[in-house]
Image (cartoon, rainbow, N blue to C red):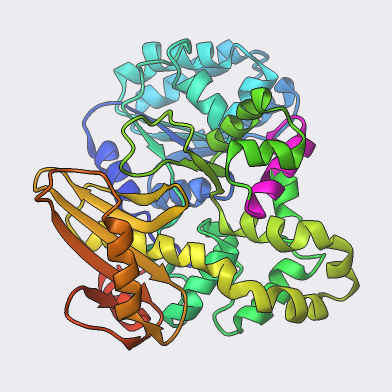
Amino acid sequence: MIRTFVGRKKELGFLEKEFAQNRKSFIVVYGRRRIGKTELIRKFLRHKPHIYFLVSQEPTNIQLERFIKKIAVFSGERVPKISDWEDAISYIGEKLKEKKIILAIDEFTYLIDSNKSIPSYFQKLNDEYLNDSKSMLILLGSSISMMESDVLGHKSPLYGRRTGQIDLAPFDFETIGMMITTNIKERIITNAVFGNIPMYLSFFDNNLSIEENILMHILDKNSFLYKEPEFILKQELREPSKYLAILFAIAHGNTKLTDISNKTGIPSGTLSKYTEQLIKIRLVYKETPVTERNKKTKKSLYFISDGLFYFWFKFIEPNLSDVEDNPKHFLKSIIVPDLPSFVSKTFENVCKEFVKKNLDYGSVGRWWYKGEEIDIIGLNKQNNKILFAECKWQDDVDGIELLRKLKEKASKVIWGPRNRKEEFIIFTRSFSKKNNEARFYSLKEIGRFFKSHQSPCI
């Protein structure tokens, strides 16, 4: 596994700025599991006076004992006899007032699970002790719904007391390039298979081929990633079987609610409850046509957010016995032939990131209507500019013919005034033909852009 810490420059800068303030600081850090919350905070805490406490799923009295011991060890004191959380808060509160300290509590929601009064106790810590100090409190959590309701929500005792929050997102493609040092084509395939989650990407070995990495780190039944999606669903959700069925349906092309309902047998009236929960824990995202004004439209489509989950539900989940029986044969006969079509969606996302970072368009997304689709449309409302882009994960593409078809579809897109300014882009692996009527970007140009924008490892 790659151990070098990469990315998160913006988040680290924010934490450093907060710590430098001549006042108290209360930061909430949350995001889905494996996203890198702990690594971010450990990086920030280095060389600073701090108490880091990782909460485990244990009874509240054991959690309390471990917490008190952690504080006493930091202070160089004998462990006091404290039997309740109210006294524990007073104990740590006095320490925070004595000198500038960072108190970071990881997996804070486990504390709430074992004792529903925990948010009230930490309200007291903030109001009676932290406010009179220059110390810093950081609460981390992987249960996004609990962090948003029990810590950040308006009904929480802690509501309105934070000085900042970090909703940690998956890596973008630019940052992935700091971990995956292969050429641009292999990097896109790796992104498609291993996704954008830092921990999953950390398993990728740059000295092995993509096929070797898949075989070693995903298809091996003893590997960490082999049953990771199933493990996450069972840990995060009730009725995991229904969520498994929904993700399977989406992975196999059922992206409309009606199609998901037909495939899973879950009534459409209750299906949205499950899809909204998958969106909330960042495993699924909902997409509407970028030109659509009504975001509650029934035109919405659903996609799996993470590449590894998509890969697992597409190839592994329906073929577990074949994978375990002969993983090498399964890789060669089932996965490799289907990889080009599987990677195409990731290539589209990479091109979308290219547009967002390289061109002046405020809204960027897909468009579809009555069987017609355009991979990328960019909207610049101020200048009445609209971008149309097509993405083909193929070599030797006739760019002129693809541009002709794109212009034909573009004429059906209703947006802006009649004299709108139109721009066209074709993205492919390589071209056999192109002209001067549009921008044509091959993998070579795309790779050059992302390479020039990469920051060094931290």
Against 76, is 172 above or below? below
Residue nearest the observer in this picture, 170 or 90 = 170
Image vertical order of residue 330 relative to residue 49, above or below = below
Instruction: Please name whichever residue, 86 or 428, is drawn nearer the observer in this view of the structure.
Output: 428
In which quadrant of the rendered image does the C terminus lie?
bottom left
Q: Does the magenta segment cover residue 234? A: yes
Q: Quadrant of residue 160?
A: top left
- 452 above or below 263? below
Q: Quadrant of residue 59?
A: top right
Percent of width and height locating residue 428: 38, 77
Q: What is the x, y in percent for residue 47?
A: 38, 51
* Quadrant location of the N terminus in the rendered image: bottom right
Left or right of 239 on screen, residue 250: left
Question: Looking at the rendering, which quadrant does residue 88 occupy?
Answer: top right
| Viewer-side residue, 419 vs 266 | 419
Residue 45: % across, % down: 42, 47
Q: Position of residue 185 (x, y in %)?
A: 46, 79
Asked whether, in this view, residue 430 is left or right of residue 146, the answer is: left
Classified by dominant secondary structure, the portion drawn in magenta counts as helix
Q: Is residue 245 visible?
A: yes
In the image, the segment drawn in magenta is: 233-253
Question: Is 119 inside the magenta-drawn segment?
Answer: no
Question: Residue placed at 39% from the left, 11% from the top?
Answer: 128
Determine the residue positioned at 52% across, 58% down: 198
Query: Seen in the image, is 274 located left or right of residue 429?
Result: right
